Image (cartoon, rainbow, N blue to C red):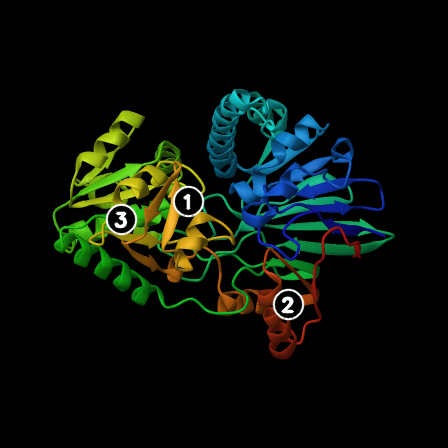
């Protein structure tokens, strides 16, 4: 009998990695992501399965917590086929190359320091190199199109559907025949909401024996999009009018593009005070180019901006900080700028330099527009840290700290319930990609409102289909 084991995103949000083992011996892996925050150490641990025995890797989308361990998978023997949307693979290349580059640079710095004290043997090499990341794209890759099934074997087929989370994101349905019985498993991937600034609403599957669904926000609803946008605009306008600067730690993929789109709309609606807007993230710049290339997959409001002036994101106030030197020059600007920089959880990237130079100034504002994993610098600031340590300095947090949850690219509780309700046949729900306390609430809601038996998946447990 077929069974599934989850080697990530089980009672935690990051590290997505789910292995479907069919009775005929086929092994299908769904995602292979990086653990982040307090769980990061698990990234370096053994997989819990033999990568050499994995036949096919299905990628739901390109975020690091869904693709970040693929180079490690290859290093340990995986040589099978990869199936993903074309946009996801383009974005994954940006994500993985950037991750590998940062890891190698951090390793060199740590090694240099350790050598001075004779402790170089205690410095752990990065999980993979730039060459390892490049190897991902030497594999056999089949590009999936939404709503078009791919026959993997005579008994197994897979269908990708738009998940509405980020560009190229997919819900994956695997249908197979076993002992004369037809079975279906759906992996939601990360689902977007029904109202999004840039992506269309997610598509629905109709039937499944088992649904593995994300539960990041299964415990609550987001605020309305209008209220969220209004708050964002208010902070921007107030800060700029008070001669301050706005710092936006932003994920390179999806959130940055949403922020650029919002600022462009503010500019055309004459709501944006005169300022300089800097996109200070090479990775986000490359991702933005990919979003432009696949503009046909965006929602209608985003497409209308393209029709207006021939671009989706560019507008006169926007400047791109291509080089480190460009980034450093921004520090000379005393007031009147909006800085969008990575990383989104403030675990690295150019945003840290901007924090060093501007976090102490009470005129400035920091707007967090994305989920902050526990134990990350971003989470500590949201939780009220009065000082943070950067580059061996204690930096006073005097700037105004704002967390705007409504921008989330993840479906909220109502979105998730509505999506599940669209199934005409659904036997059981399995919760993944969520924190245990939130999953417990969501499990109860599903069972009470939708009357579907629901299980919170534990790490590596065997669940038979």
* Residue most extreme to the bottom: 448
Residue where numbered disc 1 is placed: 346
Q: Is residue 198 above or below residue 100?
A: below
Q: Which numbered tag is attached to residue 360?
A: 3
Mark 2 or 3, which is nearer the eye?
3
Residue 342 at x, y percent in the picture: 38, 40
Is the Cβ of the residue at disc 3 closer than 8 Å to that at disc 1?
Answer: no
The residue at 49%/69% (across/down) is 220
Q: How many marks?
A: 3
The residue at 40%/44% (across/down) is 389
Label 3: how many Cα within 10 Å (few below 14, some 14–19, many 20+)? some
Is the Cβ of the residue at disc 2 closer than 8 Å to that at disc 3?
Answer: no
Q: Quadrant of residue 329?
A: top left
Q: Quadrant of residue 319?
A: top left
Residue where numbered disc 2 is placed: 424
Distance from disc 3 to disc 1, alpha carbons, whole Å, reads 16 Å
Residue 145 at x, y percent in the picture: 54, 42
Label 1: how many Cα within 10 Å (few below 14, some 14–19, many 20+)? many
SS at mark 2 in the image: loop
Residue 359 at x, y percent in the picture: 29, 48
In this rendering, position of residue 204 left or right of residue 151: left
């Amino acid at each position: 009998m077929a069974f599934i084991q989850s080697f990530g995103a089980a009672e935690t949000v990051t590290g997505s990695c789910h292995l479907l083992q069919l009775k005929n011996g086929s092994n299908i892996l769904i995602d292979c992501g990086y653990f982040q925050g307090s769980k990061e150490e698990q990234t370096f641990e053994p997989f819990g399965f033999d990568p050499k025995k994995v036949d096919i890797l299905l990628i739901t989308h390109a975020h690091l917590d869904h693709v970040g361990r693929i180079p490690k998978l290859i290093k340990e023997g995986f040589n099978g086929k990869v199936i993903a949307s074309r946009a996801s693979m383009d974005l994954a290349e940006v994500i993985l190359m950037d991750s590998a580059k940062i890891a190698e640079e951090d390793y060199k710095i740590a090694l240099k320091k350790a050598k001075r004290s004779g402790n170089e043997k205690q410095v752990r090499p990065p999980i993979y190199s730039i060459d390892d990341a490049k190897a991902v794209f030497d594999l056999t890759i089949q590009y999936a199109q939404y709503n078009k099934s791919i026959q993997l074997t005579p008994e197994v087929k897979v269908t990708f559907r738009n998940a509405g989370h980020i560009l190229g994101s997919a819900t994956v349905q695997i249908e197979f025949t076993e002992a004369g019985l037809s079975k279906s498993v759906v992996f939601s991937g990360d689902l977007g909401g029904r109202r999004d600034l840039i992506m269309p609403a997610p598509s629905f599957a109709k039937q499944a024996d088992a649904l593995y669904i994300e539960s990041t926000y299964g415990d609550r609803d987001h605020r309305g999009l209008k209220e969220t946008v209004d708050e964002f605009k208010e902070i921007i306008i107030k800060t700029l009018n008070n001669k301050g600067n706005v710092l936006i730690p932003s994920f390179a993929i999806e959130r940055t593009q949403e922020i650029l789109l919002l600022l462009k709309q503010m500019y055309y609606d004459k709501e944006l005070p005169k300022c300089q807007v800097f996109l200070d993230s090479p990775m986000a710049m490359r991702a933005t180019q990919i979003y432009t290339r696949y503009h046909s997959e965006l929602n209608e409001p985003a497409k209308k901006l393209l029709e207006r002036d021939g671009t989706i994101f560019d507008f006169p106030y926007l400047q791109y900080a291509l080089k480190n030197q460009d980034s450093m020059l921004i520090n000379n600007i005393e007031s009147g700028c909006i800085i969008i920089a990575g990383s989104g959880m403030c675990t690295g990237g150019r945003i840290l330099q901007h924090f060093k130079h501007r976090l102490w100034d009470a005129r400035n504002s920091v707007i967090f527009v994305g989920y902050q994993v526990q134990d990350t610098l971003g989470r500590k600031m949201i939780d009220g840290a009065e000082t943070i340590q950067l580059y061996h300095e204690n930096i006073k947090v005097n700037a105004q700290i704002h967390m705007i949850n409504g921008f989330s690219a993840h479906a909220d509780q109502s979105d998730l319930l509505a999506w599940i309700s669209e199934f005409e046949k659904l036997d059981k729900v399995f919760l993944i990609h969520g924190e245990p306390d939130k999953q417990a609430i969501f499990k109860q809601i599903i069972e009470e409102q939708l009357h579907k038996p629901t299980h919170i998946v534990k790490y590596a447990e065997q669940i038979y289909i």
